[in-house]
Image: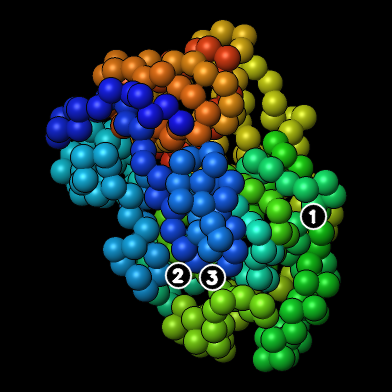
Amino acid sequence: MNNSMAPVPLAPGSFAPIELPCNQFDHFYRGGNRIGELRGGPGGPMRPEEWLASTTTRFGQAPAGLSRLPDGRLLIEAIAADPAGWLGPAHLDRYGASTEVLIKLLDLDQRLPVHLHPNRAFAGTHLGLVHGKTEAWYVLDAPAGAEVGVGFRDPVSMAQLREWVDREDADALLAGLRRAPVAPGDAMLVPAGMPHSVPAGVFVLELQEPTDLSILLEWQEFAVDGRLDGHLGLGFEVVLEAVDRSAVSAADLAGLTLTAERIEAAGLRSALPERADPYFRIHRVDAAAGPVEVEAGFGVLLVLSGTGRLRTDAGSVDLSRGMAVLMAHASGPWTIDGEVVAMACRPPAPDAPTGAA
């Protein structure tokens, strides 16, 4: 990280790029050392997540999860004070003052349990929320031969699903998932409702809808009581209705995935299939062939490698590996140059199509 950068003016009305401090915290699964190494955070052994530019709280643990700016203000407070400056008029007209996205780093020293996230219809009916939790992963690191499990390989009846959950049958649930290989530089969209698990050793940049809604289907070997905390306080009889029990084919997963070979090119390259557009955007930025411009808007630039410079109408900053730089709409377009590779993480565009329920 570039810790020598001069302090950024953060008074209301100033929209110079902001280097975000690390917002890494504990969770019920192991990991976090690669976040610490990349971002200068505390590392593991039980801090497997960092939330970047977060205006989302952890479920049932508010205000935990919210990001602070270097001047001590919560980002959510800064946005509330000037939503047009941070988000832009077109975003406000379409989405209101919500950033519409939660950006995370997940560093897994332990596989994730088989779990899922509810869609917008379920979250609205049972929790009074506008958003569900469709998410996407961009793989930063993975062991050779790593495979994620996403969706059930064969249709699963509700009776069978209830039996697996009642027995806490991790083996049956894991065996029932459709498997797909992942390697560094690959990306995958995971629609709300799909059960999934990610193996130990995988390190991802994750974008998702701005909620912290997870339903656990098994929790063996994890530091969590799934019977108490695995069902969003609704009970399993209710939350199992959120599970997509249909079969997911290999072709289905291929349609949700972009491989590194399809993503990695000079310039600005989308890192997700078009089906992600209603929810969020991730673009891989490689400035090796010349300056790359990103349109004005709220977002975070996470630097993966190299050095360079980011210029905006409101100010500029030197870039180096591990920096997470926050931009507001009022900063103006971002111009990135130098021998730098980074990920531009942004909300859906104001004219994005409407997402599934």
The residue indicated by pointer 1 is 147
Q: Are marks 2 and 3 in contact (CB under 8 Å)?
A: no
Measured in 3D between alpha carbons, the distance from the residue under mark 2 to the one under mark 3, in whole angstroms, is 23 Å
What's the amino acid at mark 2? Ala
Q: Work out whether residue 234 or residue 323 is closer to the camera in this orientation and state it.
A: 323
Marker disc for residue 85:
none
Q: Residue 156: where, in percent of width, then height?
A: 77, 78
Q: In front of the other: label 1 or label 3?
A: 3
User: How many numbered discs sit on the rendered protein?
Assistant: 3
What's the amino acid at mark 3? Phe
Classify 301 as above or below 286: below
Q: Work out whether residue 79 or residue 64 is closer to the camera in this orientation and state it.
A: 64
Residue extending farthest to the top is 290
Element at label 3: loop
Q: Is residue 298 left or right of residue 204?
A: left
The residue indicated by pointer 2 is 123
Residue 348 visible to the viewer: no
Element at label 1: strand
Say few, some or many: other residues with alpha carbon within 10 Å of mark 1 (under 14 / 14 to 19 / 20 or more). some
Marker disc for residue 28:
3
Classify 203 as above or below 71: below
Q: Residue at x 58, y 67 (%)?
A: 29
Whichever of labels 2 and 1 marks the residue nearer the N terminus, that label is 2
Q: Residue at x 75, y 84 (%)?
A: 169
Whichever of labels 2 and 3 marks the residue nearer the N terminus, that label is 3
Q: Is residue 257 left or right of residue 340?
A: right
Q: In front of the other: label 2 or label 1?
A: 1
Whichever of labels 1 and 3 marks the residue nearer the N terminus, that label is 3
What's the amino acid at mark 1? Glu
Q: Residue at x 38, y 29 (%)?
A: 3
